[in-house]
Image: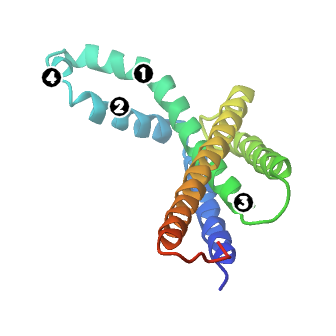
Amino acid sequence: MEGSKIFRALFIILIAITSATIFHFSSENGEISGNTSGKVIKKILAKFPEYQKLSDKRKAQIVEKLQPFVRKMAHFSIYTLLGFNLMGFFLTFKFGKILKYGLAIALGMLYAMSDEIHQMFSAGRTAKVFDVGIGTCGVVFGTILIMIFSKIVYWARNSRKYKKLEKEEDKGYVRETL
């Protein structure tokens, strides 16, 4: 199987897993979703001795205050992963970079929109245009990350080829193909 086809298949699987994860979290009712983010916050705060010294009431207030931020960061992060995977998939094709960016971002934004609509059918959840924006920003960030990553990989791969070529030149022969 050709290398790009392997990566294409891998990214399709990763897109499916990421999309299913987003769908799962959007299916949770408001109480379960809130409890999930609350547990994450409590685990992080448990690492700080100052937090442990606080009263239960104060701990609960801190967790409640941090929940919106943590929820938005989780939303941004999972959509960053979706953007990374979408762009990785499109990088396996031979067409223009602008079209690849456009397709990855458009599909990510459409998924964010459908996710918000899906949440309207989960008890205690609502659809928010702001969350579509956060999801889309995450997708854009993910596309940028994979482009940086692919440039580094490309540079490293070609750097090794050129070093090998330089060694061959030092030995008195040059290979024509890189």
Label 2: which residue?
A: 41
Front position among marks 2 and 4:
4
Q: Earlier in the sequence, mark 2 or mark 4?
A: 2
Above or below residue 111? Residue 55 is above
- The part of the image, by quadrant, that contains residue 37 is top left
Mark 3 residue type: Leu
Label 4: which residue?
A: 49
- Find numbered disc 3 in the image and state the secondary structure of the residue it sits on: loop
Circles 2 and 4 in contact, beta carbons < 8 Å:
no
As rendered, which of 107 and 117 lies closer to the eye? Answer: 107
Q: Which mark is residue 91?
A: 3
Front position among marks 1 and 4:
4
Mark 4 residue type: Pro
Circles 2 and 1 in contact, beta carbons < 8 Å:
yes
Q: Is residue 151 left or right of residue 71?
A: right
Disc 4 crowd rating (10 Å Cα; few below 14, some 14-19, many 20+) is few
